Amino acid sequence: MARTLSAPVTVAFDYTRSTGPVLGRFLTGLRDGVVVGARTSSGTVVVPPPEYDPVTHQQTTDFVEVSPVGTVTSWSWVPEPVKGQPLDRPFAFALVTLDGADTPMLHAVDVASATDMSTGMRVQVRWAADRVGAMTDIEAFVPLREDAPAAPSPVGTEQAAPITGVVTPVSLDYTYAASPEESAFYRGLAEGRIVGQRCPACHKVYVPPRSACPSDGQPTSEEVELSHEGTVTTFCVVNVPFMGQKITPPYVSAYVLLDGADIAFLHLILDIPADEVRMGMRVKAVWKPEDEWGTTIENISHFSPTGDPDADYETYKNHL
Amino acid sequence: MAKQPAAVIGIGQTHHRAKREDVSMAGLCREAMDRALEDAGLTLDEIDAIVVGKAPDLFEGVMMPELFLAEALGAAGKPLLRVHTAGSVGGSTAIVASSLVQAGVHKKVLTVAYEKQSESNAMWALSVPIPFNMPVHAGAGGYFAPHVRSYIRRSGAPNHIGAIVAAKDRNNALKNPYAHLHNEGTTVESVMASQMLWDPIRYDETCPSSDGACALVIASEDVAASSPNPAWIHGTVMRSEATSGAERDQVNPQASRDAAAALWKQAGITHPIDEIDMAEIYVPFSWFEPMWLESLGFAEPGEGWKLTESGATALDGRMPVNCSGGVLSSNPIGASGMLRFGEAALQVRGLAGEHQVDGARRALGHAYGGGSQFFAMWVVGSEKPAS
Amino acid sequence: MRDVAVVGFAQRQMEEFDGSPTCVEMLVPLFAECYEQTGWTRKDVGFWCSGSSDYLAGRSFSFVQAVDAIGVTPPVNESHVEMDLAWAMYEAWIKIQTGEVDTALVYAFGKSSAGVLRRTLAMQLEPYTMTPLWPDTVSLAGLQARAGIDAGVWDETAMAEVVHRSLGDAERNEYAVRKGASSVEELLARPMYADPLRKHDCAPVTDGAAAIVLAAGDRARDVRDKPAWISGLAHNVDPMSMGTRDLTRSPSAAAAAAGADVDGVEVAELHAPFSHQELVLRRELGLADDVAINPSGGPLSGNPMFSAGGIRIGEAARKIWSGEAAKTLGHATSGPALQQNLVCTMEGRA
């Protein structure tokens, strides 16, 4: 049996995060080339500072500057870095207790191989050239060199304004796979056919077909070739543009109940002014040129009025 | 075995805004939680369990955020749950929290629902394109607008009913210091004149996108005994149906009707419009008020719009709806359901301030989500329910 | 408290599921198995609850379509947690305890292969200071493993022994994705993968789904001669920070065990996706040396995200049904380095 259809999808957004005062203080410090921790109610200096005290649950206020030099307390090797990690060559993630802090922070250590790592080794911050107030202002830790200066290059310390927000880009790649029933539907579309499937229990014809008929939980199985004509049950006129939109407004987004189907699906109505579209209007699928077809419902460019008299309300009122 | 009595003894919410840039996610939750705890006269350490609710993780870009929030929310060392039932989540989260007390497992449960959707963009998060499909989908408004059209056709309602709801809710919000929108001067005329977004839904008939949180403290009978004004939980119901069942009624969904029937039965209510003093109903697009009034049994099918038109649902009407300003005035999606439940509780505790309905003793909190398919509702009352 | 038992369990695990991320196609036959085991139809189920994650699927509301697999005409009493099956089961157990329903079917699914799991799980971390570094779940587990090695609490031999036993036991598990290991020496001879972890110390990335059926009182007795009666069910959580925790411990696991009923447990299915974590859990749950651990092969043989914890409970229940054990334990975990834990103890009696 052919595999199900799949296609790549990227889910990406640059999240704009407001930090609040505690993380803001920490990130401001990083921008200014300083690592800031906080002393909790039990007297422990924690880096990064916790937003709320673990015991009193009050917001943290007792900030402490710590050294950019510290000790590795644990580490693990990353042989195959993934996108977004601090380095694109093998490196170590480590817990580093900076001098002046009582607990370690998590970051990367840039060394050539695992044999260069050891619990107890001394490391120092390597600052990013351009610091913006983000965790990545620390590019990585490196083994401490006695001759190396610990102070960062003074960049941006003229900016007095504290950090209140940070942008975190997130981009995740997925392979989206359709179900076997959906795949059959899309493959049908690639041949210019609209093929629904009937549920064996309730006998309703679903388009697109379902891995489980929502009423009965049974897979729809029997293929039913559907007409390319149908009725507009209900619709709206989309006037508003929005992020990620593909079709330019204003456009009519309508539920089309194809003859022979028991469920309507959303599609576009064109070839008629939007304000003349009405419930019950008879429409027909308008296909793109065959050489533009793929395994997608977009092979149907839109639905167009047939000019036939409107369907009687009784015939579609149960599909609203 | 009967449910053990449970009551809301603390309610807190944030000042809802388009962007709460002054707080982190933890700060947003704690603002609501700290107010609820103060109201309840309890500290975080005295809480037995915490239940977090919020809508899709893509909104804030954090997977299972209750895990990173555990310490900030005072949940470390306690049982922690996170509920997600789409838009009804704020309501279902409150129901899960009540169940913990009604089951006799915990005595003091804190529940918080939040959304900090300004960290991304709500329409984007709801409309990530699915391969092989037609990207006709135009966000939540684009989804519901065709069904609003169906309601208008089915009921014969005049065109201005939605505007009556919008003007009412926006003016009610002026009396709610926490509401996001404080739009002065909203009238039926001004709403009708606003831009048509997804015909037949207009701009001023549409909920805003808000950052916000709501928290409740739910307690057992013996703990509630020391509260001056607990809101006793008289009934809770959840019902779900499929997004695309053939011949599904999207205007008056079966799951909604079933949920309401089960809820009234639990609460011993036979004539909702007479026995419920006010309702906080999930109305993100104004026309949902008459639609839900019918589905819930406050009006006969086709008659809900008459109730709205008559002024019955106004603050001084026979059955006030959404005195807080409702979802139309504040919509942090994950929290909105809990805000409905919480505002209903505020009313029967007499704590709703300027938007208080005088003498409210029994109130409905209602939430829905998905493609009008997930329903969560509760009835709260100032008297302990007769078991 | 009402007497509630696990009376049904079905699972599917595979390296890569050829189908939609909502996994409806996988759920339909699982439900059919549950109905077969219990003699029920969907109308006998009082409450439904599912566990899953949008980020695994790459879409908002990814659990919604899975509801189709239930057959929701008439509408159902249903809920969802963005958590492992074990916590969906917890919500259902609570629902039964309120008296509102007598039966429940809980299910979970996850298609990890739809994305890159090592990146996806970086989204489960603190978003301001952790996720921007994209720490992957293997690296975080590795930090914990090394902490124990450095402290002398365990060593790589002890870890290899866990793997050897698990993969050997997995040979008898038809659902296992990874099985077979000749000897501890052979395992130790294999190269390091993510020092201090070798590949076999890490659970394989697995797609899958599972379902568990709960019933109260006589409803349970009608279905099974030996229902797996839940004698204890508790869960707890620790702070996430990798810096402020003692990574060789898991206080929330100990708290969950204290809230359950661990005395006399003969078989324990532990959700330890990394070999050293079994060693942590044995200690925190207070398991005696003669307790049989993960006879199914455990997560090291297959770890479908969002059902793996519930599968431990299901596997532990099966031992009761078969009469092989009179008291068993199923454990589930979530979050990095055993941050959140749930313990379910079950006993067999009439």
Image (cartoon, rainbow, N blue to C red):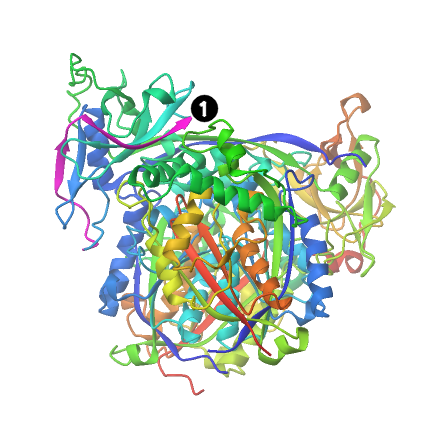
Percent from the top left, x then y, of residue B30?
28, 53
Please report the residue visible at 37 percent of the width from the left and 24 percent of the height from the top: A86
Q: Is residue C84 left or right of residue B35?
A: right
Percent from the top left, x then y, of residue A8?
61, 29
Q: Residue A71 colored magenta?
A: yes
Q: Nearer the viewer, residue B266 or C218?
A: C218
Q: Residue B216 colored magenta?
A: no
Using a 10 Å C-alpha cutoff, classify the residue at mark 1 as few (fewer than 14 neighbours), some (14 to 19) or many (20 or more).
some
Q: Is residue B47 left or right of residue A44?
A: right
Residue named by callout 1: A79
Please report the residue visible at 14 percent of the width from the left and 50 percent of the height from the top: A42
Q: Nearer the viewer, residue A126 or B294?
A: A126
Question: Magenta part of the protein: which range?
Answer: A56-83
- The quadrant in which the N terminus of chain A is found is top right
Please report the residue visible at 47 percent of the width from the left and 28 percent of the height from the top: C193
Residue A221 vertical placement versus C262 (above, below):
above
* Residue C111 visible somewhere in the drawing: no
